[in-house]
Image (cartoon, helix red, strand yellow):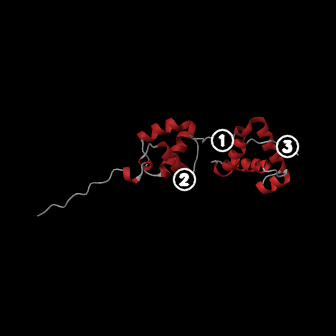
Amino acid sequence: MLQLVFSEADKHALHYERYHHPHPRVQQRMEALWLKSQGCTHEDIAALAGVSRRSVQRYLDDYLDGGLERLRRVPWKGKASALADHHASLEDYFLENPPRSTREAQAAIEAQTGVRRGLTQVRAFLKKLSACAGARSAPSRPRPIPRSKPTS
């Protein structure tokens, strides 16, 4: 079993970030190291933190290599949308030809790019695009002005 000596500052940071870090995976790593700082065995840490023994060892190796900063790192990001490459051209197209419905926008996107997306994905893309009336929130949409009835 690996013997580590944690500074008081690191113990305090581990104690705080195991509940307050914004990313749940980092919270799990901090929990494992906090348990190690309390003298738990690797088997106990794995059982209490809900990870494998190999993950515990990996967290400890990362801590030895780069300290807490290495544990706070989240190296993966989501995939970019297939429509991201066509953002500018679609924005220009929709400014000139505003769609009347999501289904119409879906057909236009498929015709322009060859990428087929579901209605929900098209709605989300249009909201990000902000090029159509549907992207505006209800309070910012133009409202008809009520006309008063002529008095006789």
Q: Secondary structure at mark 3?
A: loop
Pick the quarter of the image with the C terminus.
bottom left
Q: Residue at x 48, y 47 (%)?
A: 127
Q: Earlier in the sequence, mark 1 or mark 3?
A: 3
Alpha carbons under labels 1 and 3: distance apart = 33 Å
Using a 10 Å C-alpha cutoff, classify the residue at mark 2 as few (fewer than 14 neighbours), some (14 to 19) or many (20 or more).
few
Q: Which residue is mark 3?
A: 3
Residue type, numbered disc 3: Gln
Q: Which residue is mark 1?
A: 77
* Contact between labelled residues 2 and 1, with CB atoms less than 8 Å apart: no
Q: Which residue is mark 2?
A: 120
Q: Residue at x 50, y 35 (%)?
A: 88
Q: Quadrant of residue 96?
A: top left
Measured as percent of width and height from the top left, residue 79 is found at 64, 42
Asked whether, in this view, residue 111 is left or right of residue 79, the answer is left
Q: Which mark is residue 11?
A: none
Disc nearest the viewer among 1 and 2: 1
Asked whether, in this view, residue 69 is left or right of residue 132, the answer is right
Q: Nearer the viewer, residue 134 or 6?
A: 6
Measured as percent of width and height from the top left, residue 87 is found at 52, 38
Alpha carbons under labels 1 and 2: distance apart = 22 Å
Q: Quadrant of residue 130?
A: top left
Q: Earlier in the sequence, mark 2 or mark 3?
A: 3
Asked whether, in this view, residue 91 is left or right of residue 19, the answer is left
Q: Secondary structure at mark 1?
A: loop
Q: Secondary structure at mark 2?
A: helix
